[in-house]
Image (tube, helix red, strand yellow):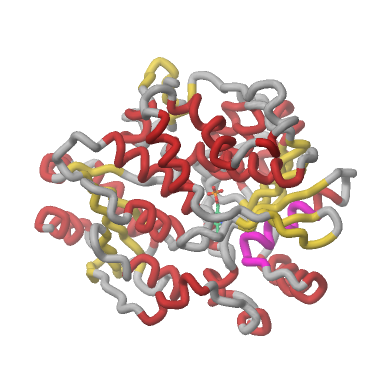
Amino acid sequence: MKYFSLQNKQHVVSFEDAVVQGLAPDKGLYFPEQIPSFEKDFFNKIEQHADLDIAYAAIKPFVGEEIPEEILRKIIADTLSFPFPLEKVKDNIYALELFHGPTLAFKDVGARFMAGCLGYFRRNDSRPVTVLVATSGDTGGAVAHGFYNVPGVRVVILYPSGKVSTLQEKQLTTLNGNITALEIQGTFDDCQRMVKTAFLDAELQAHCLLTSANSINVARWLPQMFYYLLAYKQLKSDIVFSVPSGNFGNICAGMMAAAMGLPVQHFVASTNINDTVPRFMHSGKYEPGQATPTISNAMDVADPSNFIRILELFANSLPALQQKLTSYSFTDKETVATMEEVWEKEHYMLDPHGAVGYLGLQKYLSYTKSAAGVFLETAHPVKFADTAPAALQEKIVTPERVQSLYSLDKKAVLLPNDYNALKTWLMQN
Ligand SMILES: *Cc1c(COP(=O)(O)O)cnc(C)c1O
């Protein structure tokens, strides 16, 4: 498969180049030249296929011959080494739980798959590569765990001091090995600015080979198709999927799976009050503005980077897109009320992101008859326990596999909010 830049369709690269570069030199996102199709009866007999074979069938056309079958299968097995259960919440509403991976959020899948691909592509290169990434919380943990102990790769994560949750900070700062956490005395935006400056700094680039593990990377985006396929395998009906969305990478992967033949009745993109896409779906006007902080902070995005890929899937036709996608926005007040209500009535604990997904699903189903609705529960509630209502906080059960983290010592390098401090550190270490 070849990939073209969405800024310039003449600029075409291999899967390897798309993964290693992340973004095209013209700053465009990479997009596959063709949309592959599943074989006709694949979905009729999906329950006869093992999860790993389903994932292989989905991703293989995007990788082509660039990774040998045996190695690609191993990467997939490492990526899907934890379950993706579908839990019935009530009636025809199900939660697809994507938080059973090492860092308790769905980003583990994309990060692990990308780490496997990058590790393979760099196998004969003796020069170590530095993965430089800024995080507001979830991305850093997933990338750190995904790349932990990958030979020839070191990971440097910038996070804003005092602005990530307790558990998120432990996940970033306790692995050590090839992972270094830089605690920046600034905001997430400051961290992101420092990383962007580093990528433009020729002197630094001459000194160390830098790459990003940003969510726009095709190797982080495409494996997210697996969730939707595995949900279909468990339910075998025409599903309405509601996806809590920030950068719209996750939902875009679901829409790609549908374009390849997965039967999906409809998609609902559920957002917090950062409602650029819900407004666009109404007016056809894309007006991003500034991001507003909310309790579902992994979705505090005003200008979702992957939305351009969704438009491309529908040949930039708004009416065509409206046939398949509805988008709603919800306030923090509605989110908290839903977390409380679903706990009281159904005894199901939502995290704030899943709660936004649940709200979107419920709203859409109130207008339509549908066989089944699935919302994606993108993080474990303990990850965002700091902002949950007090009455719920004490009910949240911390999974055993992260309990030990709380007693580990944090190891981070404290740096001022100053690009030169980052540059000096990268040159010296
Ligand atoms: C990243 C994230 C999202 C948003 O996913 P996108 O692919 O950016 O739309 C939703 N929920 C959680 C918990 C996240 O970490």
User: In the rendered image, which quarter is residue 191 located in?
Assistant: bottom left
List x then y, in percent, for residue 164. Answer: 43, 69
Residue 336 visible in image: yes
User: In the rendered image, which quarter is residue 359 located in?
Assistant: bottom right
Quadrant containing the N terminus is top left
166 w.r.t. 417: above or below = below
List x then y, in percent, for residue 342. Answer: 76, 69
In the visual, does 38 lie left or right of 74? Answer: right
List x then y, in percent, for residue 292. Answer: 55, 60
Kindly identify the residue that appears in the image at 65 percent across and 60 percent down: 354
Kindly identify the residue that appears in the image at 78 percent across and 36 percent down: 265
User: In the rendered image, which quarter is residue 396 located in?
Assistant: bottom right
In the visual, does 273 lie left or right of 298? Answer: right
Magenta stretch, residue numbers: 350-362
List x then y, in percent, for residue 146. Answer: 38, 52
51 w.r.t. 104: above or below = above
Residue placed most toward the observer, 72 or 414: 72
Please tell me whether residue 76 belongs to the stretch shown in magenta: no
Residue placed most toward the observer, 62 or 68: 68
Please tell me whether residue 360 belongs to the stretch shown in magenta: yes
Kindly identify the residue that appears in the image at 32 percent across and 28 percent down: 17
Residue 417 visible in image: no
